[in-house]
Every structure is written in C-alpha cells, then in structure tokens.
Image (spheres, grey):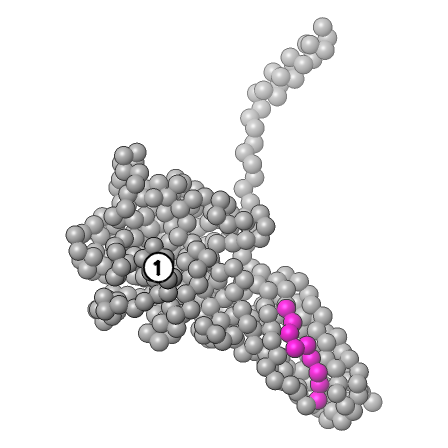
Amino acid sequence: MRKQIQLLFLILIFGTIPFQAQTEVRTDINIPDIPGYKTLKCDFHMHTVFSDGNVWPTIRTIEAWREGLDAIAITDHIEYLPHKKDINIDFNRSYEIANSESEKHQVTVIKGGEITRRMPPGHLNGIFLNDVSKLKTEKWEDAVKAAYDQGAFIFWNHPGWKGQQKDGVSKWYDEHSMILENGWLHGIEVVNEREYYPEVHQWCLDRNLTMMSNSDIHDPTNMFYEIHKGDHRPVTLVFAMDNTETSIKEALFDRRTVVYAEDFLVGREMFLKPIFEKSIKISETEFELTGNSTKHIQIKNCSDIDYKLVLEDTNEFVSVPEEIILYGNKIVLFWIKAKKDDIFESQKIKINYKVENLKVKPNEGLPVILEFDITKKK
C-alpha cells in the first residue's frame, strides 16, 4: 500500500511539471569571412505546401537556422499549385509565415516566386519581390517584367534539368539572349540540388552573371540530404556587409557570390583565393634545412572544406608532396625535403599548387602558392 501511495505521489508531482522541448541546436558552416565582407550562407530556392513542397513555411526557416544558414528565399511556384484544394493559395502568404520565425532564429527571409514555364525560357526565380501575385500573367515575358519592375533579382533555375533538357546539358536559347539584353537576367544556378552545370559556370564568366547554388528543396531537408553524416544542401555564399536584405541584394547584383556544393566551391578567383588564404594557418614559414634533410610543418585548415592540392611544377631545391588533402577542421603534416646541400643563406621557396575542388573555370582549379624562407643549416 505504501509503494502505491509513493507511486501516486510521484505521478502527481512529476505530472504537473511540463516537459521541456528538445534543445534547438545550430551547426555552423565554417567558411571564413573575406576582407571587407561577411561570408553569408544562403539558399534562394525552396518550396512549401503553398506550391508543390511538403512542409509548412516555418519549417524552412527553422531548418535553415539548424543547418547553419544566414538567409533564405521562399520561392513557391506561381503556375504549379498541386495543393490548391487543401491550401487557400495566397502567393505572399508562405513568405509571411516563414518570416514569422526570422527574428527568433536570426535568419533573413526573402520574398520570392518561381515563374514556371516550358523551355524556353524554363523556370526563373524573382526574389526581393513586393507582391508575388503580380507575376501571375498569361505571357512569361510579362511575368519576368513584373518581377523586374519590382526591383527583383532574377535568376534562371536548373538550366540543365532533365525534365526540360533530356540530355542534362544546359542550352542557351534566343529567349535568354532577349532576357539578358533587356536587363532582366542577373544570375543562373550553376548548381541545383546535386547537379553541377559546367557550361553554366562558363556562361556566368562570359556574360558577367551571378553564380548561384540552391537546394530547390521540396521535402524536409533531412529526407533529401544525409545531414547526420555530414552531408549538406548546396548554398550560395554571399559576400555582404551584413545579414540584411539590403546588403544581400546589393551583393547579388554586384556578383559577389561563390557556389558551395558537396565538397567543392565554384567562383571567381577574386573570392576563392581569400577564402583559401583565410582558411589555412601554417605553423612555420621560416626554418633551416641541410642537404637531404626533411622538415615537417603543420598546416591547419579552419574551414569545413577538404582542400585537394595538386602540385603544378617541381622545384629546383626541394621536394614536396605531389598531392595533399588539407582536411577540414584538422591539422595535416606537410613535408619539405632538401634535394641538395646548396640552398642559399636566404632562399625564398615558392611552391605552386592548384586546389582541384576550388573551381575558377569548369576544368581549372584555383592556383595557390605556398611560400617558405629556407636557410642552410650550419
């Protein structure tokens, strides 16, 4: 009887204590800021139940915060609305709901919409919109102009999507030339989901367009990406003054972006180089060597990216690894071996590598130089 009374007492006591919700945890994406700018991690293409997505809009904001993002754009389809029997479709409402979580999670939420037409011109996103409903027009040209008239940043989505390009190769049509000539096209997705389009990478360089990388996510992100195993959605790195709509918009129009997808970066050398340089810390750059001796140096990579270095040319005085991976958030031993005993008293050695997974062009890695001051050991 006493045990029963004690059990009842515990139920009464603990039954009145509310269960605490599971602690919300954010995993940062470690990619350094570059001189003059903050490196913001952004995803500008995603869907909710207000078009063909399978999540409520607030989930998009919470997911973004948990996965280390700083800004997102809600870009539900204008023309494709498979849930319209279940949802009272208001083209601005998904943004409003997602934005309700922005202050708590400090994620900037941007209003957008996806113009969903056959190829050409295919699908285009307009972001930084005032009124998404104005994009619902009969002609695609009027929809794009309606976005432009609102000061939107407009980019072409998944140009190599096999749903519109059967061979998966992106093609530039006359319609895209017209859009570009009118000033209506500002960027293109170089990566969409897990697809990298090398031809689009080159288009962005040739036509001076902003490089984008977005998830186009429809389901919960952890159903598509194995986040628990270190997998991640593709993001657009934006180099902005701060995490505000105004700064992000200015950076996008100024083409200050880099693509981050899987284990590689794609972008202009002027942005990739400082990312690499700010990521790497070399323990020693000045030391002594004698003939045939080897010096081991520690190189710390403070970023999440495994940098894959391949030697570009040999050096007259020293040997170094032909290939080396600087693993993310780890320290790697790098060796330098003197070839002969005739190193000058003050010899500056430059080692030329290319970082294969930092793509400045479709088939070209970022050139980097490791410099060391080596003196002959007495």
Q: Is residue 341 above or below residue 47?
A: below
Q: Is residue 320 magenta?
A: yes
Residue at the spot x=63%, y=61% of the render? Answer: 329
Quadrant position of residue 339: bottom right
Residue at the spot x=39%, y=41% of the render? Answer: 54
Residue at the spot x=60%, y=73% of the render? Answer: 309
Please tell me which residue lies in front, 33 or 75: 75
- Residue 50 is situated, as x and y percent measured from the top left of the image, at 32, 42
Q: Is residue 238 visible to us here?
A: no
Q: Is residue 178 left or right of residue 93?
A: left
Q: Quadrant of the N terminus?
A: top right
Q: Quadrant of the C terminus?
A: bottom right
Q: Is residue 85 visible to us here?
A: yes
The magenta region covers 317-325
Please tell me which residue lies in front, 322 or 182: 322
Q: Is residue 342 left or right of residue 132?
A: right
The outermost residue toward the front is 167
Q: Is residue 217 magenta?
A: no
Q: How would you rate the neighbour count of disc 1 (Cα within 10 Å): few for under 14, some for 14-19, many for 20 or more?
A: few
Task: Identify the residue position indicated by label 1 in the image.
Answer: 166
Please tell me whether mark 1 sits on a helix, a strand or a loop.
Answer: loop
Residue at the spot x=69%, y=85% of the render? Answer: 373
Q: Is residue 213 above or below residue 17?
A: below
Please tell me which residue lies in front, 81 or 7: 81
- Residue 60 is situated, as x and y percent measured from the top left of the image, at 42, 45
In the rendered structure, which amino acid carries the disc numbered 1?
A: Lys
